[in-house]
Image (cartoon, rainbow, N blue to C red):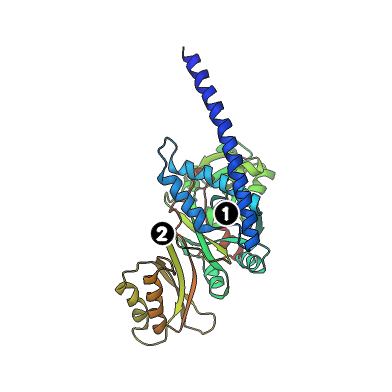
C-alpha cells in the first residue's frame, strides 16, 4: 500500500516537473525578448532594483514547505540563467577561483555568468572601470577584524558605484588526501585562516607545524600534491582539488561574517529598503565632525557604519566613510546630504543600493565564506578575515 502511494506521488511530481520545465521555457523566452528591447534602448541587462524586488515578492508569497533561503537559491539560478540569455554578465572578483570572494559573487549573481578571477582589489576596480568586467566583487569589512583599507582607498578615487552588497558567514574546513587526522604531519593555509582556526588546530593536531601560504586555494592545491599535508579553507576547495574533508566549521569564532561590495557603473533605482554609502572630509577645527553628523540625527536618518581612513593627499588628515539608511533619491536623504555638504570639505556619494541579507541568501555551512582574499593579496595584518 505504501509503495502504491509512493509511486502515485512520484507520478504527480513527474507531471509537476514537466510543467515547471514548460513554464521555465516561457519565462526564458520573455526574458530573452526583454533583453532585445533593452538593447534597443541601450539599457543594461542587469537591474539590481528589479531583481531585489522580484526576490522580495517571491519570499513574501512563500507558503512553504521550502524555506525562504531555499527559494532564494532556486530563483537566484533561474534569474541568472535568464539574464545570461539577454547578455552574458562578466564578473571580476578577487581570486583565485573557489576562494570566498568567488563564493560571494556566485551567491549574488548566480552561476550563469563569466567569472573573471583577479589577483588584487586594484585589478578588480581597473577591470570594471575599463569595461572588461561588467561588475566587480570585493570584500569591504569583516565583523571581527574590521575594514579592508585597500577597498576603501579605491572607492575614494574610483568613478565606480556600489550597486549591491553580500553578507556571508565564514566557515573553515580541514581537508587533505587522507581520511584520518592521525596521518596529518603539517597544516597549510593563508595566515589569517590559520589564525582563525588556531584553537581548534592546537587542540586536535598539537605539535603539527603550520605553514603560511599566499591563499587558501594555493594551500588546497599543495595538500592535493603532498602526503601528510592538510589545508584550511572553504569546502569548495576540497571538491575542486579532490580532497577529503576531515572536519567542518573549525573556526574558533562561531559568528564571523564578511561583507562584500558589488561594483558597477549604473545607478540603482530605489527599492524601499536601501543603503547609501558616502565619504566625506571635514575642516580642521573643533566640532567639525559633530557639525557634519548632526543633520543625520536631526532628520532621523540612521548611520549604520562610520569609520576613518588616512587621507592620501594630506598627512594627518582623514576621510570618513559612512553608510546611511535610505536611497539618495529619497527626499529626506537628499535634503540631509545637501545640508551636510555645507559643513564638509568633500562629499562623495559612493552609491545607493538594496540592503543585502545579513547572512547571505545561502546557508553555506562548510562551503563557507570570507573576505580573507583581500589580505591574501595585499598582506595587510588588519585583514577582512
> Which of the two residues, 38 or 140, is positioned nearer the viewer here?
38
Give the residue pinned by disc 1. 105
> Which of the two residues, 73 or 58, is positioned nearer the viewer here?
58
Q: Residue at 42%, 49% (x, y): give it.
A: 254
Going by the image, does 314 lie left or right of 131? left
Residue at disc 2, secondary structure: loop
Give the residue pinned by disc 2. 273
Residue 28: image x %, image y %? Answer: 61, 45
Residue 260, relative to residue 70: is it above or below?
below
Asked whether residue 55 appears in the rendered view, the answer is yes
Q: Which of marks 1 and 2 is nearer the N terminus?
A: 1
Residue 261: image x %, image y %? Answer: 52, 61
Residue 343: image x %, image y %? Answer: 39, 83
Residue at disc 1, secondary structure: helix
Going by the image, does 117 lie left or right of 311? right
Q: Which of marks 1 and 2 is in front?
A: 2
Amino acid at each position: 500500500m505504501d509503495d502504491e502511494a509512493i509511486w502515485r506521488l512520484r507520478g504527480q511530481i513527474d507531471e509537476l516537473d514537466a510543467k515547471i520545465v514548460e513554464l521555465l521555457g516561457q519565462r526564458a523566452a520573455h526574458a530573452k525578448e526583454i533583453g532585445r528591447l533593452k538593447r534597443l534602448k541601450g539599457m543594461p541587462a542587469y537591474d539590481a532594483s528589479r531583481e531585489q524586488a522580484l526576490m522580495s515578492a517571491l519570499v513574501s508569497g512563500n507558503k512553504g514547505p521550502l524555506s525562504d533561503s531555499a527559494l532564494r537559491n532556486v530563483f537566484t539560478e533561474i534569474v541568472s540563467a535568464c539574464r545570461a540569455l539577454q547578455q552574458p554578465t562578466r564578473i571580476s572578483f578577487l581570486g583565485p577561483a573557489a576562494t570566498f570572494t568567488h563564493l560571494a559573487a556566485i551567491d549574488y549573481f548566480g552561476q550563469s555568468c563569466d567569472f573573471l578571477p583577479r589577483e588584487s582589489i586594484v585589478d578588480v576596480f581597473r577591470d570594471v572601470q575599463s569595461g572588461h568586467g561588467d561588475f566587480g566583487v570585493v570584500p569591504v569589512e569583516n565583523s571581527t577584524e574590521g575594514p579592508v583599507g585597500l577597498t576603501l582607498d579605491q572607492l575614494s578615487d574610483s568613478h565606480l558605484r556600489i550597486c549591491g552588497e553580500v553578507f556571508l558567514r565564514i566557515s573553515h574546513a580541514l581537508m587533505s588526501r587522507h581520511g584520518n587526522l592521525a596521518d596529518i604531519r603539517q597544516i597549510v593555509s593563508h595566515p589569517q585562516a590559520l589564525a582563525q582556526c588556531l584553537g581548534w588546530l592546537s587542540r586536535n593536531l598539537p605539535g603539527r607545524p603550520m605553514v603560511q601560504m599566499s591563499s587558501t586555494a594555493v594551500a588546497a592545491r599543495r595538500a592535493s600534491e603532498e602526503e601528510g599535508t592538510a589545508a584550511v579553507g572553504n569546502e569548495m576547495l576540497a571538491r575542486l582539488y579532490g580532497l577529503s574533508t576531515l572536519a567542518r566549521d573549525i573556526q574558533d569564532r562561531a559568528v564571523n561574517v564578511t561583507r562584500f561590495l558589488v561594483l558597477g557603473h549604473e545607478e540603482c533605482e530605489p527599492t524601499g529598503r536601501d543603503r547609501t554609502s558616502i565619504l566625506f572630509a571635514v575642516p580642521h577645527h573643533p566640532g567639525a565632525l559633530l557639525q557634519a553628523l548632526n543633520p543625520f540625527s536631526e532628520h532621523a536618518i540612521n548611520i549604520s557604519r562610520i569609520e576613518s581612513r588616512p587621507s592620501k593627499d594630506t598627512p594627518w588628515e582623514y576621510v570618513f566613510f559612512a553608510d546611511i539608511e535610505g536611497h539618495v533619491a529619497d527626499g529626506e536623504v537628499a535634503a540631509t546630504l545637501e545640508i551636510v555638504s555645507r559643513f564638509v570639505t568633500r562629499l562623495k556619494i559612493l552609491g545607493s543600493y538594496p540592503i543585502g541579507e545579513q547572512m547571505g541568501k545561502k546557508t553555506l555551512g562548510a562551503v563557507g565564506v570570507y573576505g580573507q582574499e583581500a589580505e591574501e593579496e595585499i598582506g595587510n595584518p588588519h585583514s577582512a578575515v
